[in-house]
């Protein structure tokens, strides 16, 4: 599915963008809302994105172990 480098880079860009957007939204909501469930869901999504970003980055790093 995500095999070629261009596809991985495009996906990485999308995930990083969504991660930044969530960071902004979470920052705004923390001081304004009493809806803790919604805030927890956003934080969980952000953590999942972080994991997926790390996975893709690890795929883009070539194996140069000699």
Image (cartoon, rainbow, N blue to C red):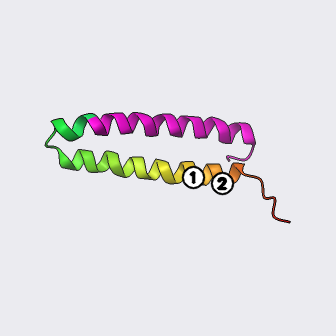
Q: Position of residue 65 (x, y in %)?
A: 81, 64
- Asked if labels 1 and 2 touch by Cβ distance under 8 angstroms, the answer is yes
Question: Which residue corresponds to the image point at 66% horizontal and 38% vertical from the top-left?
Answer: 9
The image shows residue 7, relative to residue 47, as above or below, that is: above
Q: Quadrant of the C terminus?
A: bottom right
Label 1: how many Cα within 10 Å (few below 14, some 14–19, many 20+): few
Q: Position of residue 24 (x, y in %)?
A: 35, 34
Task: Say which mark, if any, is on residue 58.
Answer: 2
Q: Position of residue 3 (x, y in %)?
A: 73, 47
- Highlighted range, magenta: 1-27
Residue at the spot of label 1 = 54
Count of labels in the image: 2
Q: Nearer the viewer, residue 27 or 13?
A: 27
Question: Which residue corresponds to the image point at 33% horizontal and 45% vertical from the top-left?
Answer: 42
Mark 2–mark 1 Cα distance, whole angstroms, equals 6 Å
Q: Secondary structure at mark 2?
A: helix
Secondary structure mainly formed by the magenta segment: helix
Left or right position of 24 against 36: right
Q: Position of residue 45 (x, y in %)?
A: 39, 48
Left or right position of 31 against 3: left
């Amino acid at each position: 599915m995500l095999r070629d480098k261009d596809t991985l880079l495009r996906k990485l860009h999308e995930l990083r963008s969504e991660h930044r957007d969530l960071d902004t939204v979470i920052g705004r909501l923390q001081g304004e809302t009493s809806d803790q469930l919604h805030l927890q869901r956003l934080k969980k999504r952000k953590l999942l994105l972080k994991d997926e970003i790390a996975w893709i980055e690890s795929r883009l790093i070539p194996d140069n172990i000699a």
